[in-house]
């Protein structure tokens, strides 16, 4: 299936969770904020939040002075 990850199309496995996506991206979950369809996903829900075809996902990392997108 396809999602939009930080504005770019990306093929992912059907039923992938936010945790699994972050693992694929080699991103530590405790260091990022994740939005799905413009809604913030709380860290304890990463493992139970399943992505669907067409979802818009933003993965942001906190840095001094603001946030930065993960590519």
Image: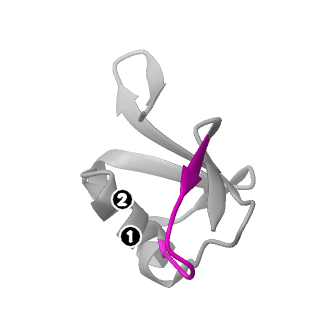
Residue drawn at (71%, 60%), measured in percent from left and top?
A: 55
Q: Position of residue 43 (x, y in %)?
A: 43, 66
| Residue 6 highlighted magenta (yes or no) | no
Q: Is residue 46 left or right of residue 49?
A: left
The image's colouring method is one colour
Label 2 to label 1: alpha-carbon separation: 5 Å
Residue drawn at (41%, 63%), measured in percent from left and top?
A: 21
Secondary structure category for the residue under label 2? helix
For mark 2, does the 10 Å Cα neighbourhood hold few (<14), some (14 to 19), or many (20 or more) residues? some
Rendered image quadrant of residue 68: top left
Q: Is residue 55 above or below residue 61?
A: below
Range of residues picked out in magenta = 9-17
| Residue 14 highlighted magenta (yes or no) | yes
Residue drawn at (42%, 33%), measured in percent from left and top?
A: 71
Q: Position of residue 11 (x, y in %)?
A: 54, 58
Q: Is residue 21 above or below residue 66?
A: below
- Judged from this view, the residue extending furthest toward the top is 65
Q: Main secondary structure of the magenta part?
A: loop
Question: Residue 22 bears which disc, if any?
Answer: 2
Secondary structure category for the residue under label 1? helix
Q: Is residue 25 left or right of residue 35?
A: left
Q: Is residue 38 above or below residue 15?
A: above
Query: Do the CB atoms of the residues marked 2 and 1 lie less than 8 Å apart?
Result: yes
Circle 1 residue: 19
Q: Is residue 36 left or right of residue 30?
A: right
């Amino acid at each position: 299936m396809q999602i939009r990850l930080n504005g770019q199309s990306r093929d992912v496995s059907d039923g992938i969770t936010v945790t699994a996506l972050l693992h694929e991206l080699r991103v530590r979950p405790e260091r990022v904020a994740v939005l799905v369809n413009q809604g913030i996903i709380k860290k304890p829900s990463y493992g139970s939040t399943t992505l669907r075809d067409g979802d818009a996902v933003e993965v942001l990392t906190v840095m001094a002075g603001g946030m930065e997108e993960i590519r």
